[in-house]
Image (tube, rainbow, N blue to C red):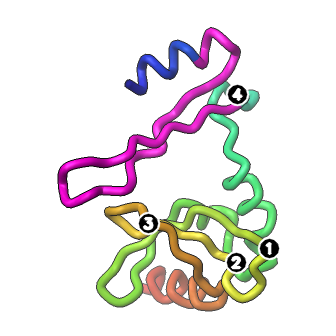
Amino acid sequence: MLEACQKVAANHGLVAESAGWRGMDTGFAFELVFRVSVPASDGTAFNLEQDRFEFLAEHYGLQPSDFGREFRTGSERFQITGIDPKRPRYPISAERIPDRRGFKFAAEQVAMILHAQSKP
């Protein structure tokens, strides 16, 4: 399916990429997720969430390279997917691994967890 979407997107001067899957329903169904965008100068898909994260990360005590980084809280793993400055208490967006369900976190909590994980 991704290959078919990429061909259609290319015909229109766009880039299509897989954004994985979500909504696993007891093993019987899931949703495929595709992202279609205007290509960046290097030909890859433009990712507004990543660009916004990289621009705002240091303001929230994070590093621009933290976008897409995984972290653990309790027994669950998450992947950082963005920053929303309109949510001052919980600006960090993350998806739980493996079901890709979205969650919001306080920036201080995520920064503390990432810092602790990077210590030897």
Query: In front: mark 3 or mark 1?
Result: 3
Image quadrant assignment for residue 26: bottom left
Image quadrant holding the C terminus, namely bottom left
Q: Secondary structure at mark 3?
A: loop
Q: Secondary structure at mark 2?
A: loop
Q: Work out whether residue 108 or residue 106 is closer to the camera in this orientation and state it.
A: 106
Dot 1 alpha-carbon crowd within 10 angstroms: few under 14, some 14 to 19, many 20 or more:
some
Image quadrant holding the N terminus, namely top left
- Which stretch is magenta? 9-37
Alpha carbon distance from label 1 to label 4: 25 Å
Query: In front: mark 2 or mark 3?
Result: 3
Instruction: Find disc 1 in the rendering and name its residue.
Output: 85
Query: In front: mark 3 or mark 4?
Result: 3
> Hey, which residue is sitting farthest top in the picture?
11
Marks counted in the figure total: 4
Q: Secondary structure at mark 1?
A: loop
| Kind of residue at disc 1 | Pro
Alpha carbon distance from label 2 to label 1: 6 Å
Decide if residue 25 is on the left or right side of residue 95: left
Q: Position of residue 59 (x, y in %)?
A: 81, 77
Q: Which mark is residue 39?
A: 4
Q: Position of residue 23 (x, y in %)?
A: 36, 56
Decide if residue 113 is on the left or right side of residue 50: left
Q: Do the CB atoms of the residues marked 1 and 4 lie less than 8 Å apart?
A: no
